[in-house]
Amino acid sequence: MDFKRFRYPLFIVASLLFGIKTYIMYRLIFNLELENRMQEFILLINPFVTAFLIFAIAVWFRKQSRQMKFIRYSALAGSLILYFNLVFYRSFNDFITAPQLFQASNMGDLGSSILTLIEIYDVLLFLDVAIIWYLSRKKPEVMSVSCQKSGKVFALAMSFLLLAGNFFLAEMERPQLFTRAFDREYLVKNIGLFNYHIYDAAVHSKVKTQRVFADGNEVPEITEYVDDKVKSEKKSPLHGIAEDKNVIFISLESIQSFVINNEVNGEEITPFLNSLVGDESTYYFENFYHQTEQGKTSDSEFLVENSLYPLSRGAVFFTHGQNEYHGLSEVLGEEGYYSSVFHANNKSFWNRDQMYQSLGVDHFYGEEAYEVNAENSVGWGLKDKPFFEQSIKYLQSMEQPFYSKFITLTNHFPFELSEEDSSIDKYDSNSSTLNNFFPTVRYMDEAAEQFFNQLKESGLYEDSIIVLMGDHYGISENHHKAMSQYLGKDEITPYDHVQLQRVPMFIHIPGHEDGKVISKVTGQIDVKPTLLHLLGVSAKDDIYFGNDMFIDDRKGYIALRNGDFISNEYISTSGICYNRDNGEPVESEVKTEEKSKNNTTASDKKQSETPCDPIMQKVEKGLEMSDNIIYGDLFRFIDFNKTDEIKNDQ
């Protein structure tokens, strides 16, 4: 190689600076959990491998100016990608996916939420970019490199060799990493953030083509799976108890079950919801889990309406808003119900205006249906109390029976609330998010109680069933230290984290006198079949992945979107199988399998297995089946009014 002026090539300097910065962010800011030395080694090398692969492209430019320009803007672009992921991670404890890049229309509504995620010291993350820009402009003759074609090929070959080595180690550490990629954190830990984004974009392109090539031949297999592995023929004594009653569904923003029957600063956090726990007209499900992913509230809506799982990447409301569905609103519409959604936010936020049409919702009362001003709004918009006050008139004028869903806003990150609206003091911890959380939860609790009273005054109460459900978590993993302080724990383990994904679920049936606390494991996937069961509506020919929450003949587990699950006996998360009762890890058992060939016994094969492994296979199969329905838009091939009939005219 005939390198000239090779004293300080900028592409090497840039690779080192960018690699060091990325590694520091992995360990100190993204706080990726490492389980062994192999993971530590892979995490150490992958930022340098990726940086070298990108910056080494500069040697293919002949002119100094073009080399320097390429390195400068590559460093800036890479740093911006890192920073956008950092801001996103601070809020959702997750990494950006390709579908979310198409959700930019939501950014205008995020407002102060994004500002709270930006820190002054973030400017230090661009220090290496400033150094690279300075060197490229002040000393281009020293920092540039000139080489023959053989040298360029060598640099490129070395880049791909290092990348292949990284991928080989990643596959050794996490077999089937790319085929079973439920967990984005595992991908980032093993192949790096930038390679993850390339992989994510490739997957996004692949799934976009899945609808084009779908022809309905997948439907019989899915139908057979649901009939055999999910559905139950049994009915509980509550079947049809709410026949022809109105359904009022209240989506409680960002609330988690740990606040129920709990206190902060010596005061009850949710006195009204606490009163429902022991109410004779109310069923409270104390082990009810949210199952949302990146779509958060919209994922919660999707689960409730369809009893399908959300996608692992992006929000179904955005990525597949024009699909055909057989949602709860549509099913009840066929039974004479009028359906509506009340949410005092922009109708295009989360693509609701399009998605509600696909779900068969008759009317959406969005922001334009309310009087919103500076006095009655905070954070994301209209406060919950005036929201319910202004909604009751629409409900009273509605043709009955109706199915109406109310989506609250006040208890939304960053949990802003004025002192005059706060009934309890903030908590005192190192997390302002957790500190602010309790007053907004109490405000939402008061708003729900007020709404109950308004329903009674309006005459709608006795003719309705009222469902209150938490939509998703409010306090992410980023606040585990403060959560451990509040809960009186030394630390929040992966087991504890899964348990914190429980959200309140109440089904209130006025006039009913057999309410109780139910401890069985349930989740948002179960809401649709449960409500249809209570209303006496047949779901015999429907396709869904949940169970009626009132029967015992259930599939026995709740799957989270990342592949974790909660069963009656176990919790599986972070590759560990826990005993659900005590949170202790369950040791693997070594099992022996005999293989025979031509009636000759071969050598025994030993394998390590936990009680979670057989359930894990069911979880993965269910998630795959649900994904196939969404990606292939398979409901367009089914006529739900005619049993087992597949449309052939698509």
Image (cartoon, rainbow, N blue to C red):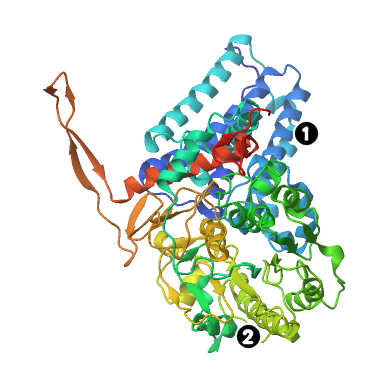
Percent coordinates x, y for residue 303 in the rendering: 58, 54
Q: Which residue is mark 1?
A: 137
Q: Residue furthest left?
A: 600
The front one of 404 and 34 is: 404
Residue drawn at x 73%, y 49% is 355
Q: From the viewer's perspective, is 292 left or right of 168?
A: right
Mark 1 residue type: Arg
Q: Which residue is mark 2?
A: 425
Image quarter where the N terminus lies is: top right
Distance between mark 2 and mark 1 Cα atoms: 55 Å
The front one of 73 and 11 is: 73
Residue drawn at x 66%, y 20% is 59
Picture quadrant where residue 402 is located? bottom right
Percent coordinates x, y for residue 190 in the rendering: 47, 39
Can residue 196 be seen? yes
Q: Residue furthest bottom?
A: 266
Q: Earlier in the sequence, mark 2 or mark 1?
A: 1
Give the label, 2 or 1, closer to the camera.
2
Percent coordinates x, y for residue 491 in the rendering: 42, 67
Percent coordinates x, y for residue 52 in the rendering: 58, 29
Element marked by disc 1: helix
